Structure formats: structure tokens, C-alpha cells
Amino acid sequence: MALARQVKAMVPSVEKVRFCNSGTEATMAAIRLARGFTGRDLIVKFAGCYHGHSDALLVKAGSGALTLGTPDSAGVPEAVARQTLVLPFNDPEALRATFRDHGRSLAAVILELVPANAGLYLPRPGFLEELRRLTHDHGTVLIADEVMTGFRLGPAGAQGVFGLTPDLSCFGKIIGGGLPVGAFGGRGDIMDRLAPLGPVYQAGTLSGNPLAMAAGLAALETLRTTDAWNRLEALGAELEQGMVAGAKAARIPVRFQGIGSMFCAYFTDRPVWNLDDAMHSDRTRFARFFHGMLDRGVYLAPSQFEAGFLSTAHTSDDIETTVRAAEAVFATL
């Protein structure tokens, strides 16, 4: 109960919360709950957003404004994948067309407010507002996947940063203080559809176990009562300034994208707003950059399509070391 109260106090959109064992469990349960609440089957996800490995969400991104899903993993039935529509992120026209054609059948839209599984890119101004309007007008449940951003970007996660009020939110990773835990929560009338109050089943032997709850409560109380988020914002800004200056000095085309303690570097001279843009970056050059940094003692995420994260253990000296290493590597690219 104490951790539930803490989550509710920090995230205003969460009226009720249910704990589970991982972010994947949280998103899977939120999708089932949205379908049970609306009585509809179709869901929308966005290309480049990853929401765990449940069948309905392991769907490839396609081209065009709207793509009917095909399985992205062996073992996922096509009949399941066809219930998932994949749209390009940051494309309001595709959103409007989808709601025009399928609005009465859409149970939920799920998204990372800051997609961080294809590198990292941010929502364009107005995109989240249009999404909120369309889902509200069509009675579609809006699910914010905050497994990465929840309690990392601030006390209310990305939804607090961007001023969005989703119907349901999913959490993981940070909330557990290093132990396996996840959670989903949101509007009380939707959460009341969960068993035992309602007909939507969700359970797990280790859900809400005392060890994970105690660790999560300690982690959130520490974040809430320290200057952690301000320090992480400052370190993120310091890293961005140094990396951008280093790339510019070496005349290397780099798009360094970050928010708070999250960051990614794309080797491209084009803006990156979605998965298609990310795919146009120079991944060969990124691989050379990664190995060059590793040779200099800096271990970054090894894939172009992974975000980097700063932690409260990092210092300005660590940022300085990283920037100096990057300057040396940029000079070799």
C-alpha cells in the first residue's frame, strides 16, 4: 500500500495501480484491460516503440500511413498480429486517417512518449495533444508506456514533462530499485474492470511481493527527497553540449538527441523524428564510434537503436572523460 500511495502521489493520472513483475507484464495487462473496458479488439502502436514481448506487440513496422501487422517473431500467429495497427511516430495525418477508418474498433493506442528503442527521438509539438484529442473523442484508451521514462525524467515521468494525461500508464525498471517489478495504473473506472472487481483477469504469484515493494518504495522516496532530477538534467545538458561541440569541431554530421538523463547520437545530418529517419543514419560509422569509445574506456550502448542513460552515480568528471574520448574518436571518423 505504501508504494501504491507513493506512485499515485507522484503521477496524478494514476488513480489506482496494480503491481506485476515486469514492464512486459504491465503493457500486456494494460492492453487486455483496454480491450475488456472498451469491448473492442484493435490496438495501435508506433513504429520504433517497443512494449515488451507479448504477442500483440511483437509486430513489425511497415511503410506508409497505416500498416496491418505481420509477426515480428516466430510463434506469433498472424491472426493476433492483424489486430495491431502500426503507424509512424510524429505523423498526425496518419493518426487522423486511422481514427477516421477504424475509430469505432480501436481499443487502445499505446506508445512511448519518448521512443527510446530506436535510438531516441522526441514528440513533435502538438503530436501528443492531437493523439489525446482523438483517443478521447473516440472512446479509445490511451496507454503511456513509461517503463523507461517513468520516474527517470521527473516525478511524473514523460507525461509530467509534456503535460499529457493518459488513461493508463505502465511502469517498470526504476520503480523496483533494481529488483524485478512492474506496475500499471490509471483511471479508476478502467482499473475497476480488473478482477476481482471486474471481468478482466490479471494475476502473478510474485506480483507485489514484499521485497520488491520495499526496494521500490526506498528508490522512489530517495528520488523524491533529493535533488536527483535536477542533477541529472544538468549532467545531460553538459554531455550534450560537449558532444555537439566535439562533432562540430571534427565536421562530423551527428544528431545528438537527449532529454533529461536519456541520450542518443545519430550519425546523420537529417532531423530524426521517427523510425524511418533513424534508419537513414550511418550505422557503420556508429559502430566505429562505439568501438573507438570502448577502446578509450567508455562503454556506450552497442547498438544505434539503444538509448543511453545517465545515473545518479555519474559525475561531471565522468562527463568530461566521455566528451574528451568522443573528441578523440570523432577525429578518426
Image: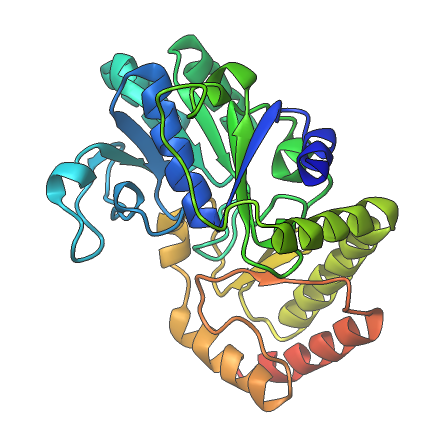
Please state if 49 lies on the left or on the right of 234 as rendered: left
Q: Quadrant of residue 8?
A: top right
**Rendering coords of residue 154 (x, y %):** 72, 42
Q: Nearer the viewer, residue 278 or 84?
A: 84
Q: Is residue 280 above or below residue 134?
A: below
Please state if 159 lies on the left or on the right of 142 as rendered: right
Residue sitting at x 35%, y 36%: 45
Q: Is residue 69 above or below residue 99?
A: below
Residue sitting at x 25%, y 26%: 42
Residue sitting at x 64%, y 87%: 297
Q: Nearer the viewer, residue 18 or 24?
A: 18
**Rendering coords of residue 115 (x, y %):** 49, 46
Among all residues in the image, which is located at the extreme right?
226
For the N terminus, the image quarter is: top right
Q: Is residue 332 above or below residue 279?
A: below
Among all residues in the image, which is located at the extreme bottom?
295
**Rendering coords of residue 217 (x, y %):** 72, 47
Q: Nearer the viewer, residue 30 or 287?
A: 30
**Rendering coords of residue 256 (x, y %):** 60, 59
